[in-house]
């Protein structure tokens, strides 16, 4: 297994809440789904992995780079290998094409029109490329956000409930595209979702977080068919309330 992220004794404290991740590894070529009730610490962990937040304690290794609470400012070349798609995408007030190519422009990478058009086609965006982002539906905007995230081929793709409140058609397109990208480009994908049916469809490993702690991490089959922890069983049966 080719590990890209290693987390060790990572801690982040807020008023009335504390995230404690004793140990966690993220692997290239897998979709790592994080489940858990609201307020469990899922998004906090994602923000730490994207270096948006600084931990109070602990260490994170990303490829050959080491970061800790005292030194959590990665160089730009590291930051540009990681991207996040949020539940509510923030698009440029511009057309869809310029939104998609924006990451390539700021990285001074070649704009390969053929590749971009292929991504747009796979995400059902071909007819929208000249349309302004403020005219898009929620599902269309989320597909643009995903295209923008994939166009520069990130090594780490972080997804914070990207299909929440979307219709089944948009969910299917996004799940298919992320799965295909994972298979083709071998990134590490971390996908936060409230929907354990979605995690079962797309995840290679599944993680349950509750109260700032990891309850259980295991492969898809073991997590859903033979969970070890009672909390996991309660979550899957609907007895753990959000």
Image: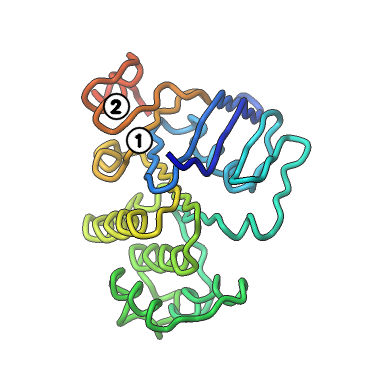
The residue at 25%/38% (across/down) is: 200
Callout 2: SS: helix
Specify the quadrant that holds the N terminus. top left
Left or right of 59? Residue 103 is left
Residue 116, x across and y down, in percent: 40, 77
Left or right of 193? Residue 24 is right
Above or below residue 41? Residue 180 is below
The residue at 30%/58% (across/down) is: 180
Callout 1: SS: strand
Residues at marks 1 and 2 touching, judged by CB atoms closer than 8 Å = yes
Q: Residue furthest top?
A: 230
Residue 68, x across and y down, in percent: 71, 36
The residue that disc 1 covers is: 205
Specify the quadrant that holds the C terminus. top left
**Colour treatment of the image:** rainbow
The residue at 38%/45% (across/down) is: 30
Task: Give the CA separation, mark 1 to mark 2.
Answer: 8 Å
The residue that disc 2 covers is: 223
- Asked whether 181 or 93 is in front, the reply is 181
Q: Tell me the crowding category of disc 1: few under 14, some 14 to 19, or many 20 or more residues within 10 angstroms, Cα based.
A: many
Q: Quadrant of residue 20?
A: top right
The residue at 58%/77% (across/down) is: 105
Left or right of 142? Residue 234 is left
Label ID, residue 125: none
Q: Residue furthest front?
A: 1
Above or below residue 65? Residue 21 is above
Sequence-first tag of 1 and 2: 1
Above or below residue 139? Residue 193 is above
Number of dots carrying numbers: 2
Residue 112, x across and y down, in percent: 45, 81
Q: Tell me the crowding category of disc 2: few under 14, some 14 to 19, or many 20 or more residues within 10 angstroms, Cα based.
A: many
């Amino acid at each position: 297994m080719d590990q890209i992220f290693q987390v060790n004794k990572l801690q982040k404290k807020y008023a009335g809440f504390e995230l404690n991740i004793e140990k966690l590894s993220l692997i290239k070529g897998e979709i790592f789904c994080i489940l858990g009730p609201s307020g469990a610490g899922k998004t906090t962990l994602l923000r730490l992995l994207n270096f948006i937040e600084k931990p109070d304690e602990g260490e994170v290794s990303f490829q050959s780079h080491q970061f800790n609470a005292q030194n959590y400012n990665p160089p730009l070349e590291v930051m540009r290998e990681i991207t996040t798609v949020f539940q509510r995408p923030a698009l440029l007030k511009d057309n869809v094409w310029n939104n998609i190519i924006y990451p390539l422009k700021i990285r001074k990478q070649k704009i390969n029109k053929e590749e971009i058009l292929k991504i747009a086609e796979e995400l059902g965006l071909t007819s929208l490329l000249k349309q302004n982002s403020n005219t898009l539906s929620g599902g269309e905007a989320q597909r643009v956000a995903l295209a923008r995230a994939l166009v520069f081929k990130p090594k780490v793709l972080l997804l914070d409930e990207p299909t929440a409140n979307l219709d089944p058609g948009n969910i299917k397109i996004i799940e298919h595209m992320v799965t295909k990208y994972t298979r083709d480009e071998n990134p590490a994908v971390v996908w936060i979702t409230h929907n354990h049916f979605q995690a079962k469809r797309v995840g290679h490993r599944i993680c349950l977080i509750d109260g700032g702690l990891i309850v259980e991490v295991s492969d898809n089959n073991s997590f859903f068919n033979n969970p070890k922890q009672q909390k996991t069983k309660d979550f899957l049966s609907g007895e753990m309330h959000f």
